[in-house]
Image (tube, rainbow, N blue to C red):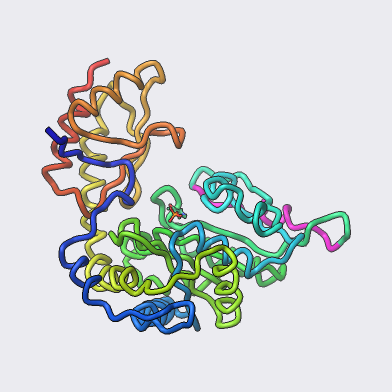
Amino acid sequence: MAVDWIDLRSDTVTQPTPAMREAMARAPVGDDVYGEDPTVNALQQRLAIKLGFEDALFVPSGTQANLVALMAHCQRGDEYLVGMDAHTYKFEGGGAAVLGSIQPQPIAHASDGSLPLEAIERAIKPLDPHFARTRLLCLENTWHGRALPLDYLRDARALCERRGLRLHLDGARLFNAAVALQLPARDIAQFFDSVSVCFSKGLGAPVGSVLCGSRALIDEARRWRKVCGGGWRQAGMLAAACLHALDHHIERLAEDHARAARLAAGVRDLTAIRFAGQHTNMVFIDLAPAHLQAFRAHMEAAGVRLSIGYLPNIRMVTHLDLDDAAIERTLAALQSFAP
Ligand SMILES: *Cc1c(COP(=O)(O)O)cnc(C)c1O
């Protein structure tokens, strides 16, 4: 019998809803390399306006959105400052260096995930042939589920203005941050020169990310998208899923956050499992390493999948395809684990 998994590994695992599939099937399409796909154009225009930018570019993945952003901001021999554990440094195959000849300068995160402003300041290189040219600061929001405080973003922006740096946001989960802070997403986006947003995470689309920025930056990014093999044709069917998500899947992120909080409340007092934090749609737990194998087997036997091994903590992520019953079943499995 097929197992009806409760999949908490990531919010990327969602299936497109019947209504989303219908919107995809109905979408008018054209050749996007010629700029002629009306649904892609509608998505790009809508997100640019929503986040307060001149223009936007629809791409297949968050990795490609960040890569073409970095390549548009930086030239060969330039450098970007980035968190040591940031997706744009650690989880994108080193693409900026491999494909862009852009040097990353990783910076250690503070315990709240932010990059200390003094550390950023110290990492900026003097203009001297010994050094790469420091061009860009790259932040991530949400950071392991945390919404970065607006004051921090304002200060980071001021630093970039003062030191002549551009500022890019890996906003894969920007809308989770906006919903958690109860702010329009553009109040977060306003501090940045460019923002990438994933539609295949909490927003529930099957494919797609959008990069927003100035018209000049997006023109440059579109060129790099083509070079990277990301020029696509009748992509409007995918853009239609993203437009559907903008209409129907943003406010409901609050339900994912509430379910994550319910999970957190249920694991807080366990003894075999240590609760290590909950932010927006993510819950983190720890376990003695000796018990990890048994824990994984116990959870799989209960039909529950978790993310074990990528981060120091075990991660559980709530999403569109999990209801209250799935959360209660997960809690029952967690509570019955006895190493
Ligand atoms: C998922 C994710 C991305 C992009 O990942 P893709 O799988 O390439 O879409 C970028 N940044 C963060 C923080 C992410 O979680």
| Res 128 seen here | yes
Q: Measured from the top left, where is residue 225 in percent x and y?
A: 55, 68
Q: Measured from the top left, where is residue 25 in percent x and y?
A: 22, 72
Q: Residue at x 74, y 61 (%)?
A: 78
- Residue 294 lies left or right of residue 170; in this view the side is left
Above or below residue 4? Residue 159 is below
Q: Residue at x 60, y 53 (%)?
A: 95
Above or below residue 250? Residue 112 is above
Above or below residue 90? Residue 228 is below
| Res 155 seen here | no
- Residue 315 lies left or right of residue 338; in this view the side is right
Quadrant assignment for the N terminus = top left
Q: Measured from the top left, where is residue 253 in percent x and y?
A: 26, 59
Outermost residue, right side: 129
Q: Nearer the viewer, residue 78 or 20?
A: 20
Quarter of the rendered structure image containing ligand 1? bottom left
Q: Is residue 95 magenta?
A: no
Q: Residue at x 39, y 58 (%)?
A: 173
Q: Residue at x 27, y 35 (%)?
A: 305
Above or below residue 191? Residue 5 is above
Instruction: Give the quadrant of residue 301.
Output: top left
- Residue 73 lies left or right of residue 192; in this view the side is right
Q: Measured from the top left, where is residue 232 in percent x and y?
A: 45, 70
Q: Is residue 119 magenta?
A: yes
Report the magenta residues as a range: 113-127
Q: How many marks?
A: 0
Quadrant assignment for the C terminus = top left
Instruction: Give the quadrant of residue 289.
Output: top left
